[in-house]
Image: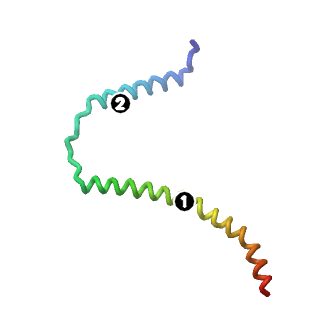
Amino acid sequence: MAKLPEYFMTRLVTLRSTVCAAIVLAATASPALAYIGPGVGLGAIGTVIALIGAVFLAIAGFLWYPIKRMLRKGRKPAEASRDNADD
């Protein structure tokens, strides 16, 4: 088996110890015994929906305006020729 450089060995040991610590902490966690009422639940759901909507609208805005600009540039020569035909 090929030897790994010392840098990778220390990273591997650090990763392994971090994973072991996370498993131990997750296994020994006690429940919070907290009650989340319907108002907080609906507020959380509304926040998630608003966040998803904002991301969708941001993506749509970044895509729509360049497409709209390209469509207008493509239409301008045709409109110019119609305007000259009316004179």
- Choose between 14 and 48: the one closer to the eye: 48
Residue at left offset 80%, top offset 82%: 85
Q: What is the three-letter code of the residue carrying label 1?
A: Ala
Measured Cα–Cα span from mark 2 to mark 1 = 39 Å
- Choose between 69 and 7: the one closer to the eye: 69
Left or right: 69 with respect to 85? left
Assign the N terminus to one quadrant of the image.
Answer: top right
Compared to 85, does 57 lie above or below? Answer: above
Q: Which mark is residue 60?
A: 1
Left or right: 30 with respect to 78? left
Q: How many marks?
A: 2
Q: Which mark is residue 22?
A: 2
Element type at marker 1? helix
- The image quarter containing residue 66 is bottom right
Residue at left offset 60%, top offset 64%: 65
Element type at marker 2? helix
Q: Which mark is residue 19?
A: none
